[in-house]
Image (tube, rainbow, N blue to C red):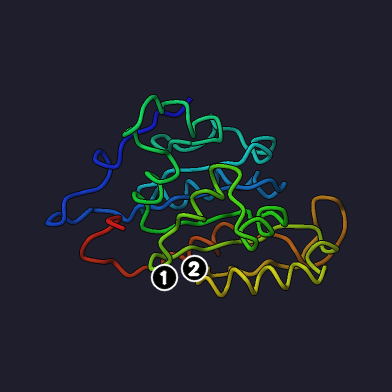
């Protein structure tokens, strides 16, 4: 079980400059989560990384395969270390800690939750508490039929209005055997998109 740390352990003082950006990577329930390990490895070469996974994404990813030093937080960790009033709450601590959040893969279900403001797990609670002056990227992954559903367009527009940046899905042979749009962008594209757009601030993670 991942250990919950207080924000005072993670947030540097105003006069200090972190060496690396702090990236919060999150995976929701899509077969594309099998690429989450690769994504974590790419970002770990440049940034300090912490990871979040939904319950359904755990079906596709192996915590033991994640890079050394990357802590994976799950729904079970949300309240496990909370004992009394005044203790840190994990989704708030992670929101404070991160300079950037990347949700890859973003499933149709989690997309709909974010668009509707729902927050029923660790990942969506972080998004609901997010400081939109800091970047938040999403890389959708879903079957073509789901991608082409009119609700998907509506939900993407809704999260775009929040300031969330879309890393577009791609057209390819999907895991189910169908061919079409809806596949998650390759980890290298996600990494490059985030890194090229990164602009260091004088005080990281102080939101």
Residue name at image x 52 percent, y 43 percent? 52
Disc 2 is placed on an element classified as helix
Cα distance, mark 1 to mark 2? 6 Å
Q: Which residue is mark 1?
A: 196
Residue 168 in percent (x, y) is at 64, 70
Residue name at image x 61 percent, y 44 percent? 120
Picture mark count: 2
**Residues marked 1 and 2 touching at CB (< 8 Å):** yes
Residue name at image x 59 percent, y 54 percent? 104
Q: Nearer the viewer, residue 7 or 203?
A: 7
Residue 127 in percent (x, y) is at 51, 55
Crowd tier of the residue under label 2, counting other residues whose Cα lies within 10 Å: few below 14, some 14–19, many 20 or above: few
Residue name at image x 46 percent, y 54 percent? 129
- 166 to 69, vertically: above or below: below
- 42 to 80, vertically: above or below: below
User: In the image, 119: left or right of 93?
Assistant: right
Could you say which quadrant of the image residue 90 lies in? top left
Disc 1 is placed on an element classified as helix
Residue 61 in percent (x, y) is at 63, 37
Crowd tier of the residue under label 1, counting other residues whose Cα lies within 10 Å: few below 14, some 14–19, many 20 or above: few
Farthest front residue? 85
Residue 159 in percent (x, y) is at 59, 68
Farthest left residue? 15
Q: Which residue is mark 2?
A: 193
User: In the image, 131: left or right of 108?
Assistant: left
Could you say which quadrant of the image residue 207 lies in? bottom left
Residue 64's tag is none
User: In the image, 150: left or right of 105?
Assistant: right
- 95 to 70, vertically: above or below: below
């Amino acid at each position: 079980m991942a250990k919950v740390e207080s924000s005072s352990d993670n947030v540097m003082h105003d006069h200090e400059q972190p060496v690396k950006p702090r990236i919060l990577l999150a995976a929701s329930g899509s077969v594309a989560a099998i690429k989450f390990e690769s994504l974590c490895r790419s970002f770990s070469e440049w940034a300090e990384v912490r990871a979040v996974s939904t319950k359904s994404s755990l079906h596709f990813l192996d915590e033991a395969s994640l890079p050394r030093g990357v802590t994976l937080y799950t729904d079970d960790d949300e309240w496990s270390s909370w004992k009394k009033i005044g203790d840190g709450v994990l989704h708030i601590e992670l929101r404070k800690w991160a300079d950037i959040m990347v949700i890859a893969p973003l499933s149709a279900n989690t997309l709909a939750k974010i668009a509707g403001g729902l927050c029923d797990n660790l990942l969506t609670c972080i998004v609901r508490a997010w400081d939109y002056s800091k970047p938040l990227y999403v890389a959708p992954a879903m079957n073509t039929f789901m991608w082409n559903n009119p609700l998907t367009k509506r939900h993407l527009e809704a999260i775009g209005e929040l300031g969330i940046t879309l890393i577009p899905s791609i057209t390819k042979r999907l895991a189910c055997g169908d061919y079409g749009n809806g596949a998650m962008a390759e980890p290298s594209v996600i990494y490059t998109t985030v890194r090229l757009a990164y602009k260091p601030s004088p005080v990281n993670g102080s939101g």
